[in-house]
Amino acid sequence: MNLPPIIRKTIFLIAAIASLTPFIEPPLALFLGIVLAQLIGHPYEKYNHRATGLLLKISVVGLGFGMNAIVAAQAGKQGILFTIASISLTFLIGLTAGKLMAVNKKTAILISTGTAICGGSAIAAVAPVIGAKENEISVSLATVFILNSMALLIFPPIGNWFHLSQSQFGMWAAIAIHDTSSVVGAAHKFGAQALQIATTVKLERALWIIPVSFIMALAFKSSKNKIKIPWFIFFFVVAMFLNTFLPQIHQLDQMIVFAAKRGLTLTLFLIGAGLTRNALKTVSLRPMVLGVLLWVMISVSSLIVIINMIR
C-alpha cells in the first residue's frame, strides 16, 4: 500500500498506542503488527530490533514484581532436567540434520541455538562468537522468528485441546517456544500460574547462553570476542525477592506488573511489525525446513514427557 510517509507513521503509532490498552490481547497485538507490516511496511524498521529488545527486558523485570521467589525456585528446580536434556538433544539433532541437509554450518548452529535456548537473543549472542556473516544471521533470525510467532498463536489452543494444567503448559511453553516474549505472551494467555512457571523456567534456560557461548568460542577459536551476558535476568530475580519479602510494596507491585504486561503486548506488536516482506524474503527453504524440524521435535517430545510426568 503506497501511502505518504506521514500517513504510514500515523497509522503505525495509533496501532502501537492501541496495543498499550487493555482491549488488545498479546496474540492480537502480534497479528496486528504482522498485518501492518504486509500492508504499509514498518516506518521505523531500523529502530525495531533495539526497541523490542529494550521493551522485552523492562517488561520481564516488571513481571518479576508479580512472582513469588519460593514458588519460582521450585518451578526452576523442576525444569532443570528438562532444560539440560532438551538443549542437548536439540543441538545434537540440529547439527546432524543440518549437515545431512547441506545447510550452512554456522546457519545450522544459529538455528539450533535459537531453538534450544531463547530464540533471537541466543542467536544475537552466539553469532559474533562464531563469526557468522550478516546473511547467516538474518536467515536464522527470520526462520526462528516466523516459527516463534506461530507458536504464540497456536500453543494456547493446543494446551486447551490436551487439557493441560497450568503447570504443564507453563513448562511446555518455556521449553518449546523460542523467544522469551512469546513464551510470556502464550503463558499469560493461558493463566497466571502458567505465566509464573513459564517465565521462571525460560529465564533459567536463557542463562545457558553463557556456557554455550563459551563452548562456541573455544570451538571456533574466537575467545577474544565479547560474550553477551543477559544481565536483565538478575534484575528479574531481584524483583521477585522484593515482591516475596517486602509485602509493604504489594500495591506498587500490582501497578508495575500491569505496566509490564502492557509493555509486553507492545513488544509483541513490534515483533509482528518486524515481519516485513523483506524479512520474509531472507528465509530460504532448507534453513526453514531445519527450523521446522527442530521446533516440531522439541514441541512434540517435550509435550509427551510433560503430560506423563507433570500434573
Image (spheres, rainbow, N blue to C red):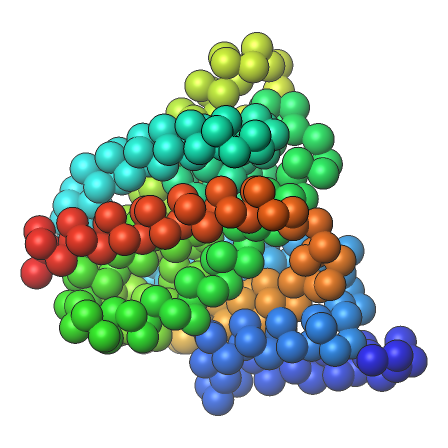
Query: Count of labels shown?
Result: 0
- The quarter of the image holding the N terminus is bottom right
Where in the figure is residue 7, as x and y percent of width and height?
85, 83
Left or right: 238, with 278 as reference point:
left
Task: Choose between 182 and 278: the one closer to the eye.
Answer: 278
Taking the spot 47% from the left edge, 75% from the top edge, the residue there is 27
Q: Is the residue 192 above or below the residue 138 in the image?
A: below
Task: Choose between 150 and 15: the one closer to the eye.
Answer: 150
Image quadrant assignment for residue 107: top right
Task: Choose between 311 and 285: the one closer to the eye.
Answer: 285
- The quarter of the image holding the C terminus is bottom left
Where in the figure is residue 8, as x and y percent of width and height?
82, 79
Left or right: 230, with 241 as reference point:
right
Taking the spot 40% from the left edge, 44% from the top edge, the residue there is 294
**Residue 263 can be seen in this image:** no
Q: Is the residue 64 above or below the residue 16 in the image?
A: above
**Residue 168 can be seen in this image:** yes
Taking the spot 18% from the left edge, 60% from the top edge, the residue there is 168
Q: Is the residue 18 above or below the residue 204 in the image?
A: below
Left or right: 186, with 40 as reference point:
left
Where in the figure is residue 196, as x and y percent of width and height?
26, 61
Where in the figure is residue 282, as x and y percent of width and height?
70, 49
Q: Residue furthest right?
A: 4
Q: Residue furthest bottom?
A: 23
Taking the spot 48% from the left edge, 89% from the top edge, the residue there is 23
